[in-house]
Image: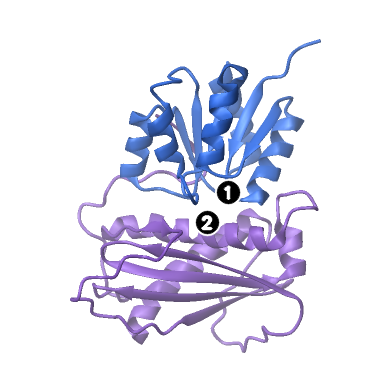
Chain colours: A blue, B purple
């Protein structure tokens, strides 16, 4: 039996988590969820070796996605991260890149584009 | 908010909302010659807040439950108030994207925004409402902004515009 790749989705919106979950499961991935940067950081620390990709929102309460990456990047430099967000400020994009983000999609997103991006980043 | 300032914000809000709802399969129309009837029926509302050096404010989105239920990309069990908040967030994202051209930025606020400098020119916290129409009902955007700069219909983008990202496309970093 082929082991499914695990994707960690970090977003404070339940709508986005459920939408991404359904889209990714339909595309053959296993999906883990976290509701903000803090929960995401805990999930990465617990299961980093198990996760093929992190999809992360930027603007979230408690700990935002870029701050979370800045805290974790040194420890998990090989873990690919795709930022999926409404945020479009160049300074945020550059900070995320320095902190290890590999790609950025501005919401709203088309599911097929997302699946294509996930396939590229987990290849 | 002065009328001329509202015209500026109204245009940006209308464009952002119409484009966003189209993405979710709802055709919204911005028709000025028509009387809104919002207020009856089962409505869902959600608010988001923003703040920067030059502007701060909030946006509330209010729409019929039936319209949101048809538009949401999430499975049935998802909360529609969460989807309304996500819609408000993404409209704010559209506003942030458009304001790049005017060299104005803001961040999303989850706590009380910082006060503006005392030189603020438009601190009247008078909300304005834009109501957009669709076959499935009306969508109201209640917007309040305080700014330390004048923004009106004649405001021109700052030259040269800052580089911006394409919405909805994949950007490899």
In this view, the residue in front, A45 or B126, is A45
Q: Residue at x 60, y 28 (%)?
A: A116
Q: Visible in this render: residue A85?
A: yes
For the N terminus of chain B, give its image quadrant: bottom left
Whether residue B9 is situated above or below residue A17 in the rendered picture: below
In this view, the residue in front, B94 or B47, is B47
A28 on left or right of A54 = right
Give the label, 2 or 1, closer to the camera: 1
Q: Which mark is residue B146?
A: none
Q: Residue at x 54, y 71 (%)?
A: B60
- Residue B142 location in percent, x, y? 52, 76
- Residue A62 location in percent, x, y? 48, 49
Q: Visible in this render: residue A117?
A: no
> Marks 2 and 1, Cα distance to the nearest angstrom?
13 Å
Q: Secondary structure at mark 1?
A: loop
Q: Residues within 10 Å of mark 1 (few under 14, many from 20)?
A: many
For the C terminus of chain B, give its image quadrant: top left
Q: Are marks 2 and 1 in contact (CB under 8 Å)?
A: no
In this view, the residue in front, A44 or A79, is A44
Figure quadrant of residue B127: bottom left
- Residue B168 location in percent, x, y? 52, 44
Q: Which residue is mark 2?
A: B90
- Residue B57 location in percent, x, y? 40, 71
Q: Which residue is mark 1?
A: A12
Whether residue A57 is situated above or below residue A116 in the rendered picture: below
């Amino acid at each position: 039996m082929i082991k499914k790749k695990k994707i960690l989705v970090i977003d404070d919106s339940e709508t986005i988590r459920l939408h991404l979950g359904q889209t990714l499961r339909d595309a053959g991935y296993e999906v883990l969820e976290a509701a903000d940067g803090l929960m995401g950081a805990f999930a990465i620390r617990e299961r980093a070796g198990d996760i093929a990709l992190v999809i992360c929102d930027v603007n979230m309460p408690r700990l935002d996605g870029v701050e979370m990456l800045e805290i974790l990047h040194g420890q998990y430099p090989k873990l690919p991260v795709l930022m999926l967000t409404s945020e479009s400020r160049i300074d945020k994009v550059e900070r995320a890149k320095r902190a290890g983000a590999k790609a950025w999609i501005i919401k709203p997103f088309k599911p097929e584009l997302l699946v294509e991006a996930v396939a590229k980043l987990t290849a | 908010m002065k009328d001329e300032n509202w015209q500026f914000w109204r245009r940006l809000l209308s464009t952002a909302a119409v484009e966003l709802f189209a993405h979710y399969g709802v055709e919204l129309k911005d028709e000025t010659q028509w009387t809104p009837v919002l207020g009856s029926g089962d409505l869902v509302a959600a608010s988001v807040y923003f703040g920067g050096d030059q502007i701060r404010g909030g946006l509330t989105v209010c729409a019929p439950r039936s319209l949101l239920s048809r538009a949401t990309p999430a499975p049935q069990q998802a909360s529609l108030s969460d989807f309304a908040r996500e819609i408000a967030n993404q409209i704010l994202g559209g506003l942030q994207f458009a304001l790049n051209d005017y060299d104005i930025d803001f961040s999303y606020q989850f706590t009380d925004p910082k006060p503006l400098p005392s030189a603020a020119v438009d601190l009247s916290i008078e909300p304005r409402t834009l109501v957009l129409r669709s076959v499935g009902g009306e969508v109201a955007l209640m917007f309040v902004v305080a700014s330390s700069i004048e923004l009106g219909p004649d405001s021109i983008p700052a030259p040269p515009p800052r580089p911006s990202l394409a919405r909805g496309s994949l950007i490899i970093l």
